[in-house]
Each structure stands twice: as structure tokens, then as C-alpha cells.
Amino acid sequence: MTSKVGYSYSNSNRIQRGSNVAGLLLGLLRTAPDFDLEHYKGTYVSGGVEYPGRHRAYRRYLGGSSTNPIYNNPLWTINEQKNITRVNRLIMSNEMNITPYTGTEVVLRAGVDTYTDNREGFFPPGSAGSGLNSGAFDIDRITNRETNYDVIARQNLDLGTISMLVTAGWNLNDRTYSRLSSYINGFLVNTDKHTTNVNTAAEASATHNSRMFIRSTRAYGVLSLDALDQIFVNLSMANETHSTISDSYLYPAMDMAYQFTDMANGVAPFISFAKLRVAYGKVGVRPAAHRFETLAESGFSYSSYSDPVSVGQWGGGYRVDDDKGNENLKPEVKTETEFGVDLRFLDDKFSLSLTSYSNTIADMLINTTLAPSKGFDSQYANAATMTNDGLEIDGSWDVMSNATQGVELTFNWSKNDNMVTKLGANENEVLYLGSGSVNSVAMVGYPIGTLYGTGSQTDNGKVDGKLTLNANGFPQITSTKIALGDPNPDWRGTLGLNAQWKNLAVNVLFEHSQGGDYSPRTQWVLRRFGTTKDTENEVTLTKDLKNFDGNTIPSGTTVRGKIENFGGGDVLLDEAWYRHGIGGGFGDNQAYNFAIFDATYSRIRELSMSYTMNSDALRGATGLNSLTFTATGRNLFAWYKELVGVDPGVNVGGIQTGSGLDYFANPSTKSFLFSVTADF
Amino acid sequence: MKTQTKRFKTMKHILAPLTAIALIATGCDVDKSINDNPNEITLSDVDARLFLNGAQLANVIVQVGHLNRISGMFSGQLIGFTSLYSNIYGYSLSTVESNGVWRRAYTGVVTNARHIIESAPDDKLLVGIAKVLEANAIGTLAILMGDVPYSEIGGTVDPKFDGQKSVLSAVTSLLDAAISDLGSASSRKESYDIYFGGDKDKWIAAAYTLKARYALANKDYSGALSAANSGIGSAAGDMLYVPRGDAAINSGDKNLFYTILAGSRTGDIGNAGSYLLEILDPSNAKYRGNAKTNETARHGYYTIDESSASGNTGVIEQFEPQPMATYTENQLIKAEASARSGFAGGLAALNAYRAWLAGGGRLNANFDVAANYKYDPYVEADFEAGGMENADNISKDNALLREIIEERYVSGFGSYMPFNDQRRLRGAGETALIPAFPLNTAAATQHVERIPYAQDEISSNPNAIDGLTLYDKTEVNK
């Protein structure tokens, strides 16, 4: 019997990111590059009265009579705002192994994983944003407890040339989550103390809680067969019951492998290992909790464009939840078939492995967007089907190895073709996976993650059509959003090198991603602020040209911008285009077809070097067996086909189904790690 | 034999734990009540009246939110200076901008109004209010956009788009039903009615003003006059969005225009340099004032400082109400509709309105300085050829109508009235009556005729009408 207990405590103070006026990059990049950010906080004096603690930013360069800086000075974001997370986590597991008879094993396991996550967000008065400007302090207490019980029985059966392992198991999982949030908006006192005493007026505070309960059980059986050490078969069946589904579900799975080294070796002597693999299986994803009923919702707010009204500030009150309930939820089921072959050659000096898979994900659980005229905004439903077909190849070459030296090369290549084949009730349905004016969506007939937004009118209504220009030769925006690009790469690959020479080891991992699109809206928006290369350029006209507003700019004029020909003759792209037209700026009324770029990149993902000291002198002096020093650099070098903006590899929403969206996202970090490992 | 025994023994070994597991598995079915939502309240447990303020706030977004501001930019009233509002101002407007208002109308107003009616069918005050809200929200969409879903909404099938005229007629009938319900109800203090606090008479008057609005949109001038005669008779009965709450809080319960400028949108939208301010500015050549009219106060009150929300003390000051259906609109419907059937009636109605303006009208305390405004009554001679309101010698009747329309244009600031009027008059071939606000860019060749449908409806409802442009007239204006 074994018991393990682990406790961890972590705390962090995270910077506000992304599309956020109180965040780091919006304030940094939307400020004139030559503005001195240094003194971000100071005393504003007007009419002999001193106002201390005023926020000084580019648009309020004196601290100003108004406390609204519009965008934060990034130093204010870093130093004055706090976004603290403190997590206490306890993980405990107990396992008991009983062997009542030889060949029989019973395992009993019980575990608990519980944590408390304390979060505090503190925005002193003067932070940007209408909801934060007069000061905001929010506290969240999240508790989560997950308990898990397993009973597993295994039986070995030896039937001569066939050996068999029978496993039967049962699992119970129970999760309880609770979140309690409180919020103070509007401080009476300008202080940096994190206390609700900054304003105790009842109307300045709000409180909110939410809970979640999930329980599931799983009973399963696995039969594993090994015949003649050549044929390996696993058959399994699982029955799952979840609190979030009405009925229980059965998932079958099977895999088979045939090791035919001897046969292959007989035909081609250079083959030292050969194996064929076939697998078929179904796996399910349970629906989210508490989605059966349509209920009364409170605490909501309505907004049409940065103009919210919140029911909480109007005496509370309710609405029929705009997310319609669904009592017919089923699990989302992925059915996959896979074929593979593993080969090794010349005494295992070379290895090659190929895997081809094909899967269908049916009854995908998604938040469908309902036509508002049906009375609801959305409904969580089993509404989509998606297919994936892929191929993965990996291999290695053991170039040389002996007691003191070794060189190994590895490679990996993969491609995946994805297609959304069904979505909701009608074929025009669009499911938003990210956020922003260019979004990443699911649409029938397109791969998942397709980039979607307003574009330019074309003769065929598609992004690759011929532009339909207006009388002045400028593109015109589409009235509805269209598919703009596909963020999924054509293929990805890595090349690795591991080399060792005496006590020195080197490890290099090179990565390449071919194809795929991304949408660098950071750069697109910054055109409106005039801080991009496009808007810096100066051009002197040699003939009269029209700009986007239809004004004629006379020959000889020097303007910022450039001359462009969209197919209807030369036109001038100047402030009218970049700043308040459809060629730069915010929102959904932009020609975003010009904001799609090739995301192809290569990078050295990791480069590390280590040196091990294990001399007798060291052992004698320190008593250690060995001492290893390692230096690692991650993401040190990168090459981009079309680098515009921050980094094609980042996604503003972080890791989510949507991808290819760059909107003031923090770029991928370069990092250096140094470590020392001592072996006693 | 020996082997068989051994196998049997093995089977026995395996059977014991398997049986035990099977027993546990069958005995522990998961209790489905775990999935009952612990956070939200069952609909039937909530009093119908508690749905009222939410539906009213949704209607606020429909009436004085984003589309209202966009309509102002297409009527010479507002200017989009930078960012999103500047490209909309340049007529680059996609269907996405209509999502917010469209959703709030259908899911925010109608779904909840109908829930109120279903759950408290005998509470005629609530039922009547709910019907007025639905008629207000859907009527607004129909006037702005043309054909919209109505007769089949709220079900499981994809609703068809009903003709604009039939929708206006349906919501007019709904207003009649509301008037009848409210007539049989009693007023009571109702704190969740954030428009009128449960005053049924104010609701009845507002319903009549909305009827008048819809009749006017249809150019049914006699119908409009007859409804307006029972409509909002004084500013005390105005249906307004009245901000409230703590002055330290900039959003959630404040003037919506103020809220926009108080956040990151500072500087994006305002009205400095707009045609509206030009005609109110005594120092501008286009000034509309005359010996009987001084617009100094109104000019000051209407001027928006887009560079700082807190710098505003006038029409978008954080506690300044925003109009949804008002005495102003009602009285000026009377004025226009009367003027179309006779000069004297029109003049009397206009002068009645000017008398109200002369008492301060809509001005707030910061601008209600009597020396800065004057609205003396007009007389017939003022509209005769060569009169102070007829320098270009048009007919007396048209001169009066033109003045009334201009007054509607000025007084309607912050409502959809200026946008609706110009499209109606253009449709009727009465372009000479429309205030001469210019196009926003040199590249534009015509004025906007409609607000686009919502992208969300187009992509989720196969019956949605797609492919219309900003310049396609709606049915009533054809």
C-alpha cells in the first residue's frame, strides 16, 4: 500500500494583456514612439489646487484635469495595477495492491485533488477604461475539489503460446467547484491598500457566486492477447455514466499489431524490425454541467458598442436566460481508425514510423448561435460534425555511438486535413471560436479555425475574386463577413540533433511550419495610429490622385502613405485610407482581406548544451557523483515568410480552438534557462 | 482433467473481483439531480415584474444605442472622428454593427415581454407595459431596416421576414391591445418599471405617441394626428432613459454617449462641425435663428466635447436623460400632420411647441439661461413670400412645413427622428423640405436609406434577406 501527499503554493502577479485599454501592449503600441513614458504618476496642479496620484499618459501628458488616460501608460499597468493569484493545492492519493492469487491483482485507489485559488485585481483610480477609471477592486475565491476512486482487477492467463491479460475496472469521479466574486467599483479614497474599505457605499459593490457539480462513473473491461510474440490484440469496452448526460454510453475500442520482423528480414535482410498496427476506437467528451434547463438569469448587462447598461445597477432583476437550455445533450463522440507501420533498418541504425489516421467527430458540443428572432442568443447543443485525416512520419538515424561519443538525428513530419461537415441547423451557420473583428470560426465546408471577417467586394463573392471597385478605383467592403483565410498549416516538421562528446552534450531542435494564414490586426489597427511603416512612408505625387474619401490630391503634393493600384488605375492611400477608411483601424467595417498573411515560419525551438563534471577530483572534494551544468535557449532564432506585427505563432486568445489571430498579443518569449544538476 | 480443474480455479479467481466490480458499477448510477443548475433561478419562481427593468434596459439599447448614433451620423447630426465611428461615418458599414441592437430587440425585449405576459396574464399593468415595449422595439427595427421577422418569432422554425408595412400595422394593433389592457389596469408604484414607475396614464400616452410615429412613417398623416392627440401631452410624460446611480461610476447606468467617451472611445464620435451645430450657431452663415428665435442656449446644450466625457455639461452629461418617445416628438407630429391639412392648425401646433421651448424646453440647468434663447410665436406673415421663414418665396404651406421639419430635425437630436424624417420625405419626393445636411465624403453620391440587418440573423436564419445595400429604400419610402 502506498500513500502520496503533495502540497504546493504558488503566487503570481500577472500583467493585463490583449485587447484591453488597461493592458500592456495597447497602451505601449498606441503611444507615439518618442513620448517619454517615465514619469507615469504625478501631481496635477490647477488653480492652485494639487491633485496627487494622477496618471500621466500620452493622451493626458500633464496628468490632466480628466482622470481618464484613454490608454494606460504601460508603466502604470506594470507598477500600479495588480492582478494577483495565490493558489494552495493539495493532492493526495492512496493505492492498495492486493494479490490474492498468483496472476491476479486487485488495485484500489482513492485520490483527492483540492485547491483554493485566491485572485485579486486592483486598479487604482485613474486606470483606463470606463469601468476601471474611478478605481476597481475585485476579489475571487475559487475552490475546487476533485475526488477519484478506482477499483481495478487484472488477471494473467497463460495458455501456452497465447498469453492473455484481462482487466476490469470501475472509476468514480466527483468534482465540486465554487467561485465567489466580489467587486468594488469607484474608490472614495486614492490608496494602494487592497481593502473593500475604499468604498463601502452599497451601490459601489457587487457580489456574485457560481457553483458546479459533476459526477461520473466508468466501468470498463480490457482483454489483451499476445500470440506467439507476434500478434498483439487489445479489445476494450467502457460504459460511462455522467451527471451531465441523460443516458449512459458505451465506447468500444480495438487495436491490433503484427510484428513480422522475421518474415520481413527473410525477404530484405537489412530490415531489423517490422511491425504493422491497426486501431479503431470511440472516445466521448461529456457535455458541460448544468445545461439542461432554460432558467432566469440575473447580473446581466447589455451593450451595443462600449455603452453598457447593467441590470445590477438598476435594482437587480431578471431575464429569461438568452442561452436556451437543452435536455437532450449527448456526449460528443470521436471515432478514429488508424493504420501504422514501424520499421528499423541495419541493426536499428535507422528507424522509420508511419501513421495514417482518419477520424470523425460527431455530435460535437458547441454553443450554437441562434437566430435572435427565435428568441434566444445561443444554445449549447450537439450540433456539429468534423473530420480529420492525417499522416505522421517520424524517424531517426543513429549516426554514431560509442562509449564517449554519440550523434543522433531525429525528424518528424505531420499533416492534418480538417473539414467541418455539419454545423447547427442551417448551412450558413457560423460558430465563433475566438474573438475580434477578424475571428476564427467553424463554417460548413471549411477547415476549423477559418479566418472570418468583412472583406472587399469581389465578382465571385469570395476573397480570391476580382475586386469590385467603386467609381474612384477603391475597394468596397462586403456587407457581411466572409471567409478570409485558413490558419491551419499545410504541414509541420521538426529536425532534431543530439550529440555527445565526452562530457559535453548538445541538443538542437529545429521546427518548420509550412503554409497557413494569420491575421496581424495589431499592425492593422496601428495604421490608424500612424505608428507603422506603411503610414511612415512619404510619397510625392507626380499626377493628381484621388484618395479614399474621393478628394483629389494635386500633383506635387508630398503625403504620407503610398500609391496603389487595385485594378482601376492609381489611387492614393493616405490618412483617409489608413486612419478612417477601410484600410486600417478598428471594428468590423474594414477590408480585412488585406490583413491576411502567410504564417509560414521556421525557428530553432530549443538549443541546449550541457557539461557534466564527474572527475575523481570533484568526487573527492565534494562527495558528489557528478555535477551537470546545462544552458538552454528557447525560441532564439526564427525566420518568417511574412512577418507583420507581432508573431504569427501567437494567438490572442491563448490556446483555444481558434487560431491565427494576432491582436496586441504578447509575443512569444525568448528564454534562457540555466540549470545545475547534482547527483549524489 | 487436471488442466480443466486449473482453468476452473483460474476462472474462479477472476470471477470474484469481476463480480464485485459489476455489483459496484450497477449499484452506483449517477444521480441526475446533480446537473440541476445551482446558480440560476427557476423561471416560475421569479415574479413577472422582476423581468420588467431588464426588458426596458434592452429597449434602451435599441432606442438610444449604437444604431441611434449611426443614424445621427447619416443625418448631419453627429460626426465620427476616428476609429470605428469614422469609417461608418464614411459609409463603410457592415451588417455586424446591427448585431447588438437586433439581439436586444428580439431576445432582450420580446422574449422577456412575452414571458411577462405569459406568467402574469391577469396583471394588466404588466401586460400592457410588456406590449408597449415589444411594439417599441420591433417598430424601431422595422422603420430602420424595412422587412423584419415578426409573425413567426420566438418559435422553433426559422422566422420569415414580414413586410415592413405589415409589421408596422401589427405593432400598431399591439399598441391598441396595450392601451386596452392599461385602460383596465390600475396604476401602482412599481420600482421595476424604470420608465414610468407604474403610472398607467403615462404608458397609455406613450403608446399613442408610438402609434402616431408609426402612422407618420407610413405617411398616414390623419392617422398620425389622431393618435398624437391622445399622445404624450407634456414633457412630464416623456418616455426617457434617465441615468442614475453613483457619479463615481461611469458605466452601467449613465448616459450612453457619456459612457462611450468615458472609456477608450474618447475622441471617436461627437458633433463639432456638424450641420446641426452649424444651423444652431449664431456666428455661422447657416444659422437658423431670426428675430423671433435665438438658438444660443440650444447650441451650447447640444455641443459635445468628444475629447473628454467629464468635460460635458450639456446633452451628454453623465446624468442627462436620453429621449425614446417624448412630448417633443408628439407635438411635432401634431404640427406636421396638422400643417398638411391646413396652415392654421400647423402654425398653432408649432407655436405651442415654441412656447414650451421658450420656457426652457429640454435644456438642463447648466444651459437654461433665459437670455440665451428666444422662441416667440410665429405669425402667418412670417411664412408668406419674403417673410422671415420664407426668403426664397416658396408657398406659405411649404414654408411652414419646412420650418416644422427643421424643428423636428433640431429637436429630434438623440432620437431616430431626423434619420426617419429625411428618408420619408425623400421617398415622398419632398426633398425640398429636408434640412440641407451634406454628404459625409466627396466619394459619396447619395444619402443612406436603411440600416443593415444583423449579421447574426443573416448567418443563422435561412429566411433572412441578404444582399441589400445602404441605399435600398424600405417599403414605406419607395
Image (tube, helix red, strand yellow):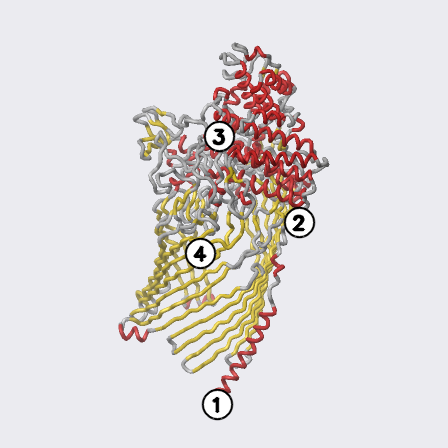
Q: From this viewpoint, is residue B118 visible?
A: yes
The local crowd at label 4, few if under 14, some if 14 to 19, many if 20 or more residues have their Cα within 10 Å, is: few
Query: Percent from the top left, x then y, of residue B381?
Result: 57, 10
- Tell me if A581 is positioned left or right of A3 in this view: left
Label 4 is found on which chain of the structure?
Answer: A
How packed mark 2 is, by other alpha carbons closer than 10 Å (few <14, some 14-19, many 20 or more), is few
The tag on residue B80 is 3
Residue type (three-letter) at the residue carrying disc 2: Ser
Give the labeled residue for mark 4: A674
> Looking at the image, which residue is at 54% across and 66% down?
A218
Q: Position of residue A102 (x, y in %)?
A: 51, 81
Contact, mark 1 vs mark 2 (Cβ under 8 Å): no
Q: CA distance from mark 2 to mark 3?
A: 45 Å
Q: Which residue position holds label 1? A: B1
Residue B266 percent location from the top left of the image: 52, 32
Characterize the local packing of mark 3: few (<14), some (14-19) or many (20 or more) Cα atoms within 10 angstroms: many
Disc 1 marks a residue whose amino acid type is Met
Q: Disc 2 sits on a residue from what chain? A: B
In the image, residue B319 above or below residue A396: above
Q: Are marks 4 and 2 on the same chain?
A: no
Q: Residue A347 occupies which quadrant of the picture?
A: bottom left
